[in-house]
Image (cartoon, grey):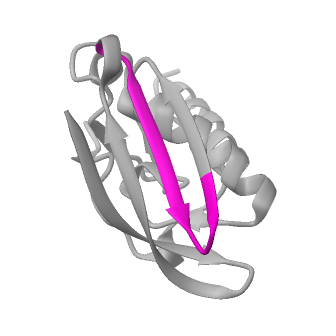
Amino acid sequence: MADYVPVQVMTPDGVREWVMNISRPGGGWEMALTGDEQSWTASGPNAFQALRTLRADLDRAGVLIGLNGARPNSWASGMQADMGEGKVVYLCEMGETGRPLSVGTLDAAPLDSVGTVAEQNEFNAAWLASRTQGNA
């Protein structure tokens, strides 16, 4: 299986549309993003982790990718990552109780709603802490 998906990216030079190749060799996930004579590749055990690995390289290049899995408030639970192959993530909101909204990890997201892996890590840690404090 290989899918070629057009994705919007924000580069230091502005908004572009690049192409991402998604494949599933041997049960894992591989992603290759190509545009403006540049290319990045990454792999992972599920879609969310492969995207995070890809984004870590993109962050160093100052590139943001317009996908739901790149939103700072998106995160795949253990079950979503394991049983659902990371194809779906939660959109977590501070202060909300109950189960967050689920969206497709690799579905398009507005560029003004995405961020870096570090921002995602920080949001997830704060969100988890807020949920724990609310249950104390």
Residue 13 placement, left or right of 70: right
Quarter holding the N terminus? top left
Which SS type dominates the magenta stretch? strand
Residue nearest the observer in this picture, 80 or 124: 80
Residue 33 placement, left or right of 61: left
Considering every residue shown, the one lying at the far front of the view is 37
All told, the count of numbered labels is 0
Residue 61 placement, left or right of 11: right
Q: Which quadrant of the structure image shows residue 20?
A: bottom left
In the image, the segment drawn in magenta is: 27-39
Which residue is at 69% across, 44% downward?
A: 56
Up the image or down, 66 lies above or below 101; here it is below
Which residue is at 38% across, 16% downward?
A: 78
Q: Which quadrant of the structure image shows residue 67?
A: bottom left
Which residue is at 49% across, 23% downward?
A: 44
User: What is the x, y in percent for residue 7?
Assistant: 39, 67
User: What is the x, y in percent for residue 90?
Assistant: 33, 42
Residue nearest the observer in this picture, 75 or 34: 34
- Residue 13 seen by the camera: yes
- Residue 124 seen by the camera: no
Which residue is at 25% across, 37% downward?
A: 99
Residue nearest the observer in this picture, 11 or 130: 11
User: What is the x, y in percent for residue 29?
Assistant: 38, 27
User: What is the x, y in percent for residue 133?
Assistant: 57, 29
Magenta segment includes 70: no
Considering every residue shown, the one lying at the far bottom of the view is 14
